[in-house]
Amino acid sequence: EAGVAQSPRYKIIEKRQSVAFWCNPISGHATLYWYQQILGQGPKLLIQFQNNGVVDDSQLPKDRFSAERLKGVDSTLKIQPAKLEDSAVYLCASSLAMTYEQYFGPGTRLTVT
Amino acid sequence: ELKVEQNPLFLSMQEGKNYTIYCNYSTTSDRLYWYRQDPGKSLESLFVLLSNGAVKQEGRLMASLDTKARLSTLHITAAVHDLSATYFCAVASSYNTDKLIFGTGTRLQVFP
């Protein structure tokens, strides 16, 4: 079974630029999560989708971050404009509905200079 | 607001020794996870603990959960170098059980 796929794996941008990350969850997984992991910290949930609807986006900085999951499968996370403090690893995870296990992708490491 | 604390933050231990990592959380939850993360890698699920008194073991790692004390432990028996990694506990929010609140992690280094 293929795991959660993310791209790109690495991205370097200057502050005030825009960036987008892509996630393809495990086939059949209805729930998709985006986490932000700052160096030396645990992951923090940014947004959770159930199919193509948002379940929780309480910690998403909505003035600069946006995410969508249009067909209930792939998802994109966008930052516009980026700030230095957005430097982090962005992890995507997915899970089957009504189950406990979340499966994490390899992450995208973003450096904002 | 649910807060999750781990200690120690750093742990350097000799091969063959035993040690315990502690995870405390601030509000009621009935689900706790342990993950392993190698440098530059993603998170690997180790254990999911679903009820008070739950104990799970895999190889040299054993995890337990005491929901009344809001405490989980990850016990390492006879450590080997391959266990060197960062270990995170994560607790499910009571209002959204899919929302995980992670601790700051324990960086474990096992030396000969």
Image (cartoon, rainbow, N blue to C red):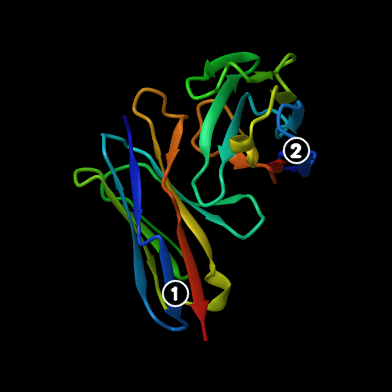
> Which chain does the residue under circle 1 lie in?
B
Q: What's the residue at 36%, 53% (across, down)?
A: B6
Residue B76 x/y as whole percent: 40, 70
Q: Return the residue found at the far bottom.
A: B112
> Which label was assigned to residue B12?
1
Q: Which of the pair A28/B76 is nearer the observer?
A: B76
Residue B105 in percent (x, y) is at 45, 54
Q: Give the residue drawn at x 52%, y 41%.
A: A43
Q: Position of residue B22 (x, y in %)?
A: 32, 58
Which residue is situated farthest in the right direction here?
A8
Tag 2: Cα neighbours inside 10 Å, few (<14), some, or many (≥20)?
many
Is residue B99 found left or right of A72 in the rendered image? left
**Residue at the location (74% across, 31% down)?**
A21
Q: Is residue B55 above or below residue B15?
A: above
Identify the mark at residue A6; answer none if there is no mark: 2
Residue type for callout 2: Gln
Dot label at residue A89: none
